[in-house]
Image (cartoon, helix red, strand yellow):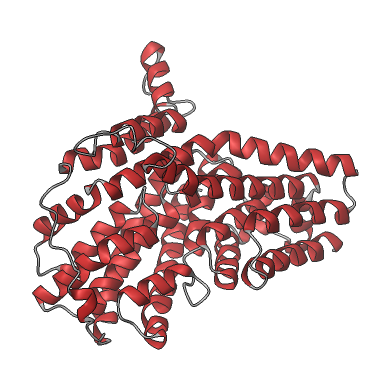
Amino acid sequence: MWRIVLLVVAIAFIVLATSKLKLHPFLALLIAAFGYGILSRQMSLKGVVDSVNDGFGATIGQIGIVILAGSIIGTFLEKSGGAARLAQRTVDLVGPRRVPLAMGLIGFVVSIPVFCDSGFILLAPLARSLSSKARVPLAAGVMSLSLGLYATHTMVPPTPGPVAAAAVLAADLGRVILFGLIVGVPTLVVSWLFSVKIAARVKLAPDESLESDAPLLATDGPSVAKSLAPILTPIVLILLRSVCMLQGAPLVEGWVAEVIGFLGQPVVALLIGAFLAFLLPARLTTNMLSTSGWVGEAVLAAATIILITGCGGAFGRVLQNSHIADVVSQVLGDASAWGLWLPFVLAAAIKTAQGSSTVSMITTAGIVAPMLDPLGLATPTGRALAVVAVGAGSMVVSHVNDSYFWIVTQLSTMTVRQGYRLQTLGTLVEGLAAAMAVWVLGAFLL
């Protein structure tokens, strides 16, 4: 029981250190890894150091370049006007009067490579402008955008959170993308229904200072095909590799299989996507590729996530080497009965307590990694579903300790009380819908 108590203390320390003491998650996870390793008395002091180094290095080695390339794609899509162009095309397809549906679809696509907070800052003026012109309740438009962004931000790579969780849980990225998209569709539908049936009843006061800055739909920037290429090409390549390399039933063999296996490696696929992103600006300059330009901004944004992910991997390796899985099996009995719900509940608890979805995903993945076997999730499919379950939990809930909560409320003229009624309740509904979708999918596949 000492290791279980120590695990609870370690989780509580991570939450309190990041939320109350404002300690950087990098330090909180690293301290927790060393503290747990030393106090668990399951390893020598040298063994603790080796576990931290091995876990940190192995995790970063797997996903460092992947996260960096994804960050570059997101930055170029945002700054080149590609995201705005995709928004225009989506509105054209669904019609300007179906603003909530359009904004949900826009958010769902844009947040695959772009951070949800950046995506909301970029697209919120469009949501306000379209809602006003179509005479649609503002709350319906902005909440559909917010929740649409959240769905893929937490469940579909190459957004850093799911990529990091997949690395810590040793999950195949292609399966994670596939399952994340499958779960994301009903999640998006539920989010849209929440926006038009519940959020629309809340009247938000218009802000003329914000409305005056609201841009019209994009009239320049890259084409829709160019804007989609950096997003879809890596996803298609990774999925193609996962499908073609299925054990026992390979669809292709020989040199074709070798080429697909190479191009579909996440690091290669995402680098191809990054190079396609370089085609988005009307004129690519060397300054954009410099340390002070767009690439420099992307590298700085990715560096923090990479370091936090490495520490999450270190924490997970220490837990694994302390044989925590054996203890959990004894305490929970038939741990497989918990299945996909344990990753969801843990991620939701950590997210609610400390605010960051990414930190929640990385921390939960580190805790769950050594428990996958007793939970019945040690298969390739189980690992991928566990990543999506962790992502679903990291939606629940967005409130005042979450920076995204303040971005959504401030750019949507919500009061804090309205933020709780809309953003907090919306992320709760969305997360539960995603969890149910993961559970149903798991019932068929596990």
**Quadrant assignment, res 3:** bottom right
Please give the name of the residue rendered at 10% of the width and 70% of the height, measured from the top-left corner: 97
Left or right: 378, with 324 as reference point = left
Residue at 20 percent of width and 72 percent of height: 128
Q: How many marks?
A: 0
Rendered view: 139 above or below 283: below
Examine the rendered structure and indicate whether residue 424 appears above or below residue 294: below
Taking the image as drawn, is residue 439 in sight? Answer: yes
**Residue at the location (16% across, 71% down)?**
129
Quadrant of the image occupied by residue 102: bottom left
Q: Is residue 7 above or below residue 373?
A: below
Let me know if residue 196 appears in the view: no
Side of 122 relative to 377 (left or right): left
Percent of width and height locating residue 252: 37, 19
- Residue 132: give x, y in percent of width and height: 13, 76
For residue 78, above or below residue 13? above
Residue at image position (59%, 33%) is: 61
Quadrant of the image occupied by residue 351: bottom right
Q: Given the current orientation, which residue lies at the most extreme top position?
A: 255
Q: Nearer the viewer, residue 163 or 260?
A: 163
Q: Which of 168/369 is in front? A: 168
Q: Position of residue 220 (x, y in %)?
A: 12, 48
Q: Quadrant of the N terminus?
A: bottom right
Residue 228, horizontal then vertical, whole percent: 24, 42
Is residue 419 or residue 129 the one in the foreground? 129
| Residue 278 as seen in the image, left or right of residue 365 | left
Q: Quick one: 186 or 80, which is closer to the camera?
A: 80
